[in-house]
Amino acid sequence: MASWSDGTSAGRRPLVIVLAVIGVIAIVVGVLYLVAGNSLPSFFTMGSHVHKGNHLARGAVALIVGVACLIGSWFSAKSRR
């Protein structure tokens, strides 16, 4: 991993970390929705009336959000000001 002294401002460091963590978590959740489908842990569906067809859509959205967050984190880390 590149050092933070390569031009990334210290103010962006928390943003990069938060986006990366959210991205990884969203990808894990998306994979769980796609793979585990009907046998999800209860904290995923707590208070929700998720129908069987929605697991695929929610998994896809979680994967897209995860990838978008990782891309945003990468661009935030790469931008030099």
Image (spheres, grey):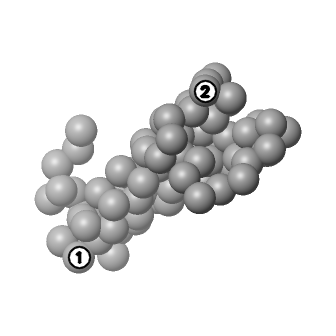
**Label 2 with label 1: CB-CB less than 8 Å:** no
Q: Residue at x 59, y 48 (%)?
A: 45
Q: Which mark is residue 3?
A: none
Q: Which mark is residue 39?
A: 2
Q: Earlier in the sequence, mark 2 or mark 1?
A: 1
Which amino acid does the dot numbered 2 rest on? Ser
Question: What is the crowding at mark 1: few (fewer than 14 residues within 10 Å), some, or many (at least 20)?
Answer: few
Q: Quadrant of residue 33?
A: top right
Q: Residue at x 59, y 58 (%)?
A: 47
Pick the residue in front: 62 or 38.
38
Circle count = 2
Pick the residue in front: 62 or 11.
62
Q: Is residue 1 left or right of residue 42?
A: left
Which residue does the numbered mark 1 point to in the structure image?
A: 11
Q: Residue furthest right?
A: 53
Q: Residue at x 23, y 44 (%)?
A: 2
Quadrant location of the N terminus in the rendered image: top left
Which amino acid does the dot numbered 1 rest on? Gly
Pick the residue in front: 33 or 7.
33
Does residue 6 sit above or below 30 in this rendering?
Answer: below
Residue 79 image position (x, y, % from top left): 40, 65
Residue 77 image position (x, y, % from top left): 35, 58
Residue 41 image position (x, y, % from top left): 50, 35
Q: Is residue 8 left or right of residue 26?
A: left
Per the image, label 2 sits on a secondary structure element best described as helix
Per the image, label 1 sits on a secondary structure element best described as loop
